[in-house]
Image (cartoon, helix red, strand yellow):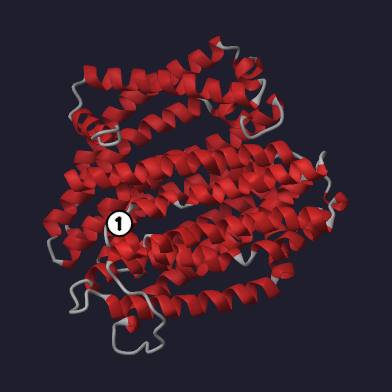
Amino acid sequence: MTSLGRASAIIGAGTLVSRLTGLLRSIVLVGVLGAVGSEAADAFTFANTLPNSVFSLISVGVLTAVIVPQIVKATADADGGNAFISKLFTLGTVVLVATTAVATIAAPWLVVLVAGRAPLEAQALATALAYWCLPQILFYGLYALLGEALNARRIFGPFTWAPVVNNIVSIIGFLILGALFAPVPTKAAEWTPAMIATLGGTATLGIALQALVLLVFWRRTGLALKPDFHWRGVGLGTVGKLAGWTFLMAFASLAAGVLQGNIVSEASGSGASATVTANAWLIFMLPYSVIVLSIGTPYFTQISEHAAAGRDPEVRADISRSIRTLLFFIVAAVAAVAAAAIPASRVFTSSAPDAEAAALVLLCYLVSLISLTILFIVQRTFYAYDDTRTPFWFTIFQCVLIVATALLAGGLYQAGVIPITMLAAAVALGQSVASTLQTIVATWLLHRRLGGLGVRTWATSIGRFAVAAIPAGFAGWGVFQLMGGAGGWTASDKIQGAVGTAIIGLVVVAVYIALLAAMRAPELKAAGGLVRRFLPGR
C-alpha cells in the first residue's frame, strides 16, 4: 500500500497540475474565440478533436488494454523485455506514421463526418485547421507508447506531468493569436491563413513537445530503445490478437462519438454545441482524471501482476479496495461539481446565460461519473487477464445505446419537443444512461468470471457515501444561492466563477467529511492516509 500511495501521489499531483493548466488553456481559448454561438471556436474544436478521435481508434484502447500487461509479462524475459519493447515500438511507430498520412489526406471527409450539420463556413475553417492538427496523431501515439511503457515499469510521474508542457505551449499560442489579430473574429468566413497557421501550428507543436519530454525520462527504464523490424518470435502475434478486439471496440466508440458530434454540430452558431460540450467534458473529466487515474493506474499495474501470477483472491481484494477508495473521493466530487455547475461553467463561457446552458450539459454528463469510476477498474481487470473480447461486447452494448439516444435527441429537436439550446444536453444525458447500463453489465460479467467481486462490500460503502454526499451537495447549493444564485456574482465573470466554485466545493467537502466522521466510516481513515501522501515531505 505504501508504494501504491506514493505512486498515486505522484500521478495525482501531475494530473492535477496538468488538468489545471488544461482548464487555463480552455479559459484562454474561450477568451480569444468565444464559446456559445462562436463558429470559429466550434471549428477549432472539430479540427482538434479529429486527431484525438483517430488516435483513439488505433492506439488508446490498444495501449491501455494490451501494452501494460504485456510489458509486465515481458520483464520476466532474459533481457528484461528489451527486445519485445523495441519491436513493439518500431511497429507502433510505423502504424502511426501511416495512419497520420492517411488521415491528413482524408481531412475534408473527416470534417464532414464530425461536423456535417454545421454551417458550410465553419466546415471550411475546420478543414483548414484539420490539416494543421491531424499530424498530432503521430505525436499522441508516441506519447502514449512511451508513457504506458514507463507506467508498466512503475515510473508513473512523467506520463502525467508531460501534458503541462502542451498546455503551456497552447496557451502561448492562443495569446499570440489574440495579440496579433485582435479582435479575433468568431465568424468562420472572416479567418485568414495566418490566423489558421498560428492556431493550428501551436496546437500541434504542444503535442510534439509533450511526446519529446518522455524521451528524457526513458533512460530510467534501463531499456535500450532502438528500431527493430524483426517482428517475429517475441509474442507480437498475441498482442495483435488482443489488440484486434480493442481496435474494434475503439472503432465502435469512435463511430458513436462521431454521430453524437454530427448531431450536436447542428447547434453551432445558435447555442451550446461542440465547444461547450468539449468544455463540459473537460470539467467532468477533472475529478475523473485527478482521482480515478491517479489512484486507479497503480492499482491496474498491481492487478496485472496478481492476474499474471494467477492470484485471483488478491485480484478480488484489489478490485474491492480500489473501488471503495476511488468512490470515497468521486462521490464527493459529484456533489461538489453538481452544486457548483453554473459558476464552474461560467469559467468557460462568455456570459451568465451561456453558463446556465453549459451547466445543463455538465450536469447531464455528471450522471455517469460514479458508474464510469467503477467501469475503470472492472474493464482493466479484464485486460489484466488478457481478455479484450468481453470488454468489446459490453462496449458495443454501450455504443448501441449511445447511437439510439443521440438519434432520439435529434428526433426530439426536429419534432420541436426540445429547443436547439438543449440538444447538446440531451445527447450528453443519453451517453450517461448508456455508460451506466454498460457498467452494470460489465460488473455482472466480471463477477461471473472471478466468482465474486465483493460487490456487497463496496455497495455498502456507496450507500454511506451517498448519505453524506446528498446533504453536502444541498449545503453547497445553498451557499450558491446565498451568493446570488445564477444571477449573482459567481456567474458575473470567469474569475468570480472560479472563486465561487472553490467556495462551494470546500463547503461540500467539509460537510461530506464531517458526516462520514459522524458515521465513523472506515474508509475515512484509509482515504486520509492516501491524502497525506500528497503533502510535501511525506
Frontmost residue, 136 versus 436: 136
Q: Quadrant of residue 147?
A: bottom left
Q: Residue furthest right?
A: 190
Provide residue 121's location: percent of width, then percent of height: 84, 55
Q: Secondary structure at mark 1?
A: loop
**Which residue is pictured at 19% across the width and 59% down the height?**
450
**Crowdedness near tag 1: few (<14), some (14–19) or many (≥20) residues, C-alpha within 10 Å:** some
- Residue 378 visible to the viewer: yes
**Which residue is pictured at 23% across the width and 62% down the height?**
304
Provide residue 64's location: percent of width, then percent of height: 38, 62
Kind of residue at badge 1: Ile
Frontmost residue, 164 versus 383: 164
| Residue behind mark 1 | 155
Q: Quick check: 185 left or right of 514?
A: right
Provide residue 219's location: percent of width, then percent of height: 33, 65
Frontmost residue, 114 versus 299: 299
Provide residue 274's location: percent of width, then percent of height: 67, 48
Q: Quadrant of residue 145?
A: bottom left
Q: Quick check: 86 left or right of 305?
A: right
